Image (tube, coloured by chain):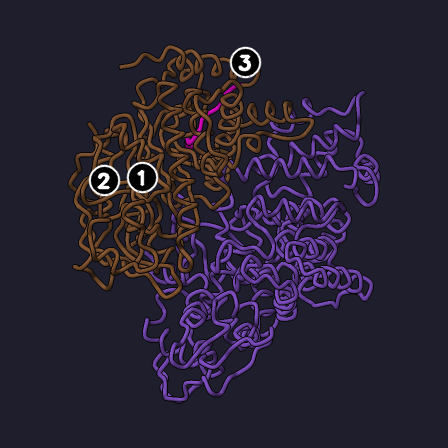
Amino acid sequence: MDDLNASQSTTLAAGTHSTAMNNHIDIDWAWQPYQPSADRPWNHRLAAHVFRRAGFGVQRQALDDAVARTPAEVVDGLIAVDDETPQFRSVADSLMQTVVAGGDPKRLSAAWVYRLLFTPNPLIEKMTLFWHGHFATGAEKVTDASLNWQQNQLFRQHALGDFSKLVNAISQDPAMLIYLDSAVNRKAHPNENFARELMELFCLGEGNYSERDVQELARCFTGWEIKNDRFRKNPYQQDTREKTVLQQAGLIDGEDGVRVVLEQPHVERFLARKWFRYFVADEPQPADELLQPLADCFREHDLCVAPAISMLLHSNLFFSPHAVGRRIKSPVELIVGMLRSLKATTNTQVIAQGLLSIGQGLFYPPSVKGWDGGRAWINSSTLLGRSNLVADILKSDATLFNQQSLTEYLASFDVHNSAQALDHFEMCLLPTPLDDATRTQLCETFSVGGGDREQTLRSLLHAFISLPQSQLG
Amino acid sequence: MPTHFSTTKTRRRFLQSSLGGATAIGIGAATPRLFAQAAQTGSTAGERILVVVQMSGGNDGLNTVIPYADDDYRKARPKLAIATADVLKCDEHVGFHPALRGLRDLFDAGQLTVVQGVGYEHPNRSHFEAMDIWHTCRRKNEVREDGWLGRLLENQRKAPGGDAPALHLGTEQQPFAVASKNVRVPTIRDLAEFQLRGQDRQELRTFLTANLSRTTAAAELNDPLLDFVQSSTSSALAASQRVTQAAQSYEAGVPYPDSVLGQKLRTIAQLIDAGLTTSVYYVQHDGFDTHAQQAPSHEVLLRQWSEAMAAFMRDLQHHDHAQRVCVASFSEFGRRVAENASAGTDHGAAGPMFVCGGRVQPGFVGDHPSLTDLVDGDLKFQVDFRSVYATILKDWLRVDPDPILAGSYGTLPLFS
């Protein structure tokens, strides 16, 4: 065997659920920027992949525009943080202020759905959703709508920014500390909850710290409390004695504790692995060696998120068959993706409620671990629920496509029959081509002939989104 | 042995009708397959069924099965002890909480056995961790990728094409206990929800069913994720079809309480009577984490549980199914022997388990654990919970428990 070769390539280890795939991936190749070639051409399908992963999909025109540019330009455009237009922001913010004033956290979800549907910065919202799952807190416990929203804005503000700043902010975030029962943290009874999750779920991963580190780190946070919905340090409750966290001894307070945790090399590996899962593939699990270059990039940029995400989205790996169609869409990706890809508008309350019923209530993650994702999204109930939610959306007169009927919207792309409509849906929504048998069967079952044309097209779309292939993205 | 002509007939009828328009499809198979064969052989009369009722939150076993004759009970529970006169006495030592009238009736009818002091070494007092231990039979430092019932289902590997091997009823996350690599367990919130909606639902069902039976199996395309979604979709459609038909012609033999648990158990009775070959049902009854002001809430929870269990058993009996159903109730831990300062109880260790059915060996297994010989203020366990599992697996479901429990555990005299 060629040793040099072995050291440069790695095998994607089989995930817990999957059979071994034996995908040998050359690590150097994996992280080099993708350059289109005759073998791997840049086309509508790949462009749709980029927009699905780095956002929630785009409509046909944007795909046409994208293929006229280079993939690098497209990715750079997504990373460059355009500020939201004043118009969008004023509508989105006033919507949110109304919700917060009303005080009902249930309505927060709908206000976020509005942002997801209409934001001009989809990657920012995609990362905001990532951080919401990463630093998961739930409105079932944190019932104050404004605290939930404040935290959500924190994620948005730091979406592609400095991870250290985000971690420092989250460790003083009222919603987080209330969620983890750390709103009161006394010298005599240090609360270990936040200290543990900071290492286990937020920064290092399980097994990369000891129980003693948890106890010592918890002492660093004594005196940190939430009073009248605000963070404050209570000097009378601070344990000022020396502590030793992760082999570093000294008199340290909470900020020092966070700093010591963030200095660990596990941080960049832990985040790289989660980003791989979020942007590249559910399974199989990548080997550590494959992720190391991404982790290194994150560390070399002092834990700034944008350069690492940029490296990932430019990479050969991201544009390869190891990534395209290798994730099960989350409920948000499925539903918001369908709507955005067809420029559709609808009742955001219905969407928010529907997302909750199929397993991804915004502001309502199942636990501090966030959503497990991947196969955990899928069971009989959620699959029927996905199809039924799409049925509810398409049944509603409030659902319009670029303010038109689906018939008129598709006609504006010169789409007039079921076969053409399928081409259109496939290009915008499907990671892999539809097989001929399915295509024929769909056209026969939902043929645009006499009858109600609009209803037939909506039924065709409903059937299309209910296909197993449509659950992958 | 009672005969089951009606059951068999019912089942034949709906299998035929489900094959009428569209082609029915398999559940839990790695790839979707036709199942016309199963339709011809689908008799369920002899198949045994396990219903698991999980009491979530940590049920206070000491105020459920009460050692009323023990003075230490009253010492440990100055506020929460149940007055001796109110205890539904079973013998000279123990009795049930007064809210458990229905359970007491089952006991008298010889349909209930209580296993005392069930637990395990080095108990964990975290809800999640303890629940995971009960669900997987594995500790935190071990790889946990499936649950004990999931392993049972994998082990049984029923021929593809039948009904879902297990069903979870509820709105909460699916219990880890039923998780496995290859067998998907559907979750049903209620029967109505488990049907396709929309004007085009008939066409959609026909289309998807035909599509799944004909598409190239994703396994062959080396796409395990698509393969998984395809088989899950098959499972969803098939289960939905059966459940819809099962709901149509059922009359309960007795009134059920209007509680959530009562309605869940009623749904299960319907499904059993419709002749589904599903052999495991799982429901949860939540709220037992009674840290403060325990008495009123614990009483409500116990009453709901007891009334639902009693109605369920009577209904099964009415429809001639009691002989083939076993209902097992457990909680992730009991609570501390001593009450706390808030008239509640904190997380403890060992507790009782309850096994109901037409073929249980009624009575108590073991004495009540000592109230003075404690570990960290908690009751010592006498019976490893895996022994109860082993007995259910071996003596009730007639499978070898060892590979499922990853070890050999003695069995108990639970069934006659």
Question: How far apart in space, not on screen, are marks 3 and 2 (Cα)?
Answer: 40 Å
Q: Which mark is residue B151?
A: 1
Residue A455: quadrant of the picture:
top right
Q: Are marks 2 and 1 in contact (CB under 8 Å)?
A: yes
- The amino acid pointed to by label 2 is Pro
Instruction: Say which element carries label 2.
Output: helix
Mark toward the start of the polypeptide (2 vs 1) = 1
| Circle 2 residue | B403
x and y percentages locating residue A259 in the rendered image: 47, 80
On the question of residue B132 being in view, the answer is no
Please tell me if label 2 and label 1 are on a single chain: yes
Instruction: Say which element carries label 1.
Output: helix
Q: Which residue appears at 77% of the width and 41% of the height?
A: A399
| Circle 3 residue | B20
The colour applied to the residues of chain A in this rendering is purple
Instruction: Say which element carries label 3.
Output: helix
Please tell me if label 3 and label 2 are on a single chain: yes
Chain in brown, by letter, is B
Residue A157: quadrant of the picture:
bottom right
Q: What's the magenta bit mostly, secondary-structure-wise?
A: loop
Magenta-span inclusion, residue A294: no
Mark toward the start of the polypeptide (3 vs 2) = 3
Q: Farthest front residue?
A: B85
x and y percentages locating residue A66 in the rendered image: 72, 54
**Picture layout, residue A4 above or below residue A59:** below
- The amino acid pointed to by label 3 is Gly
**Picture layout, residue A158 above or below residue A140:** below
Q: What residue range appears in magenta?
A: B23-31
Q: Which residue appears at 51% of the width and 18% of the height?
A: B249
